[in-house]
Amino acid sequence: MNNWLYGVSIALILTVIAFAIFFHLGRPTNMEIQEILGLTQSDPLPVDEKYVPIRKQDAIDPDINAEIALVIEADTGRVLYEKNSQKLWPPASLNKLMTALVVVNTLSLPQVVTIEEQDTAVVQPKMGLFEGEQITIYNLLRGLLIPSANDAGATLARVVTGSESRFVELMNQMAVRLGMRNTTYRNTTGFDVEGQLTTAEDLAILVREVLKNPNLAEIVSTESTTVLSENEGGSHRLVSSNQLLKQDNIHGVKTGYTDEAKGNLILLASNSDNHRIITIVLGSDDREVTSQALVTWVFESFEF
């Protein structure tokens, strides 16, 4: 028995010695580690850092003349300021951002369509489409988002699904896919109707998705332009309803107004270092002044 225990002990000792020798020989030296990582002795390890804006200690909350307000960092979605951001509110023409998003996911932008009489039988604002006019989907999107034209919206809904009601179903399906849990659409225009509501939190999701599309991002940053029909005689001057686009640091996005919603406005803004933010103001009696004050406050109150 003693001999058996002695043999086992010797075997364990030899195993430990062999493992130690193998581990030492197999482990790379400092020089080998440097070659593997492509580093020299003095190089720091590569770290992918995402800068986080820091609110200054002496920053005081802004006095916002709106029912709802939200500011996020454009690239990350990080919230920098919020006021009632989960409160349900009528979207007004901010609906047209979702209309445009559905269109770019279903139609080809160079596609040419013919305007029908029913497309023009809508209320202002309109881009002035006329029956028989041939125009591209891209130019209709410009009419939809720059002057917020309802005739462009009616045409796009008809071309995609044949009717506004079926198109609205696609809008609601897209909202669900994007995670806009508190948004319900009833029409493409944003006209006040019972049950059509959204939140600033959901709109932040929507506008970030819109800005991922280069064509839509370009359109919502356009202050004014002229679009032409594919047949003779069609020319439409489009001027943005977003008055703040005249400023160099404002790059979009969309306005909205109804009696129930009051003034709604989403902005994409930047500072001198090209840090970008998105501001969302809903239910304001002076949406431009309120939004501009919010942009100024954020860039003065945070270190970017």
Image (cartoon, rainbow, N blue to C red):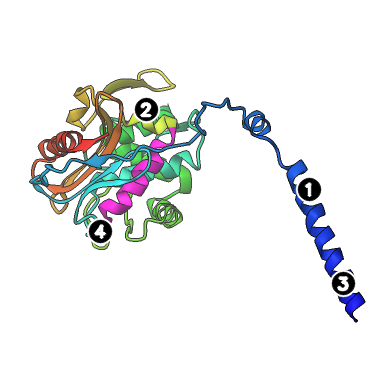
Q: Nearer the viewer, residue 270 or 68?
A: 270
Q: Which residue is at 49% across, 28% downward?
A: 110
Residue stretch rendered in magenta on the structure: 196-213
Residue identifier under label 2: 218
Residue identifier under label 4: 86
Q: CA distance from mark 2 to mark 4?
A: 29 Å
Q: Quadrant of residue 131?
A: top left
Residue at the top extreme?
Answer: 232
Q: Nearer the viewer, residue 262 or 123?
A: 262
Name the front one of labels 4 and 3.
3
Give me the disc on residue 21.
1
Q: Position of residue 31 (x, y in %)?
A: 66, 30
Q: Which amino acid type is shown beneath numbered disc 1?
A: Ile
Q: Nearer the viewer, residue 68 or 272?
A: 272
Residue at the front extreme?
Answer: 2
Name the front one of labels 1 and 3.
3
Determine if the magenta segment contains residue 30. no
| Quadrant position of the C terminus in the picture | top left
Q: CA distance from mark 2 to mark 3?
A: 82 Å
Upstream in the sequence, badge 2 or badge 3?
A: 3
Q: CA distance from mark 1 to mark 4?
A: 64 Å
Upstream in the sequence, badge 2 or badge 1?
A: 1
Res. 118 in view: no
Residue identifier under label 3: 6
- Relative to 130, say whether 9 is above or below: below
Q: Which residue is at 18% across, 29% downward?
A: 244
Q: Secondary structure at mark 4?
A: loop
Q: CA distance from mark 4 to mark 3?
A: 75 Å
Upstream in the sequence, badge 1 or badge 4?
A: 1
Q: CA distance from mark 1 to mark 3?
A: 23 Å
